[in-house]
Amino acid sequence: MIALDTSAFARLLDGETDVTSTAARDALNAGDAHLPPVVLTELLSNPWIVESAVSYVSSVPLLELFDGYWRRAASLRADLKRRGLKAEVADCLIAQSCIDHDIPLITYDRDFRHFIPAGLQLL
């Protein structure tokens, strides 16, 4: 199982062909890709998304949220902010979903490197 970040999925939808988009495509084709719920929200909130992309994105399984998820995500964000690191709410929610499931995240967003000490795995 592998999680996709909004940046990776969006670039894939845009037709980008590089190492990261190829990894995302391979995970989707193998049925290994899952989305943290906030990624689904981010992707579908694009006002220019076409209907075929809506169907494709909506077909990818979502990661389940476990009990205590919201508090763990808040604690994760507070810890990063205390250390003076960038910690957007959506990024914290995505990272916590991946940490809870112990699965790697495919992303272009370098800010996710701040979550590695908390247990996030990046591809």
Image: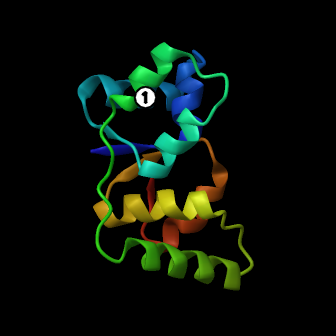
Task: Name the residue beneath numbered marker 1.
Answer: 57
Q: Report which quarter residue 24 is drawn in.
A: top left
Compared with 85, 93 (above or below) is above
Task: Say which amino acid is labelled 1.
Answer: Val
- Which one is nearer the viewer's eye here, 19 or 39? 39
Q: Is residue 6 visible?
A: yes
Question: Residue 59 versus residue 114: which sits nearer the camera?
Answer: 59
Q: Which quarter of the figure has residue 25?
A: top left
Which image quadrant is residue 68 in?
bottom left
- The x and y percentages for residue 100 are 33, 66
Q: Is residue 99 left or right of residue 45?
A: left
Question: In what quadrant of the picture does the N terminus appear?
Answer: top left
Image quadrant where one finds the C terminus: top left
Q: Residue 44: x percent and y percent?
A: 54, 34
Is 63 on the left-hand or right-hand side of 72? left
Q: In this view, does 112 lie to the left or right of 95?
A: right
Q: In this view, does 35 lie to the left or right of 74?
A: left
Residue that extends furthest to the right in the rendered view of this protein = 84
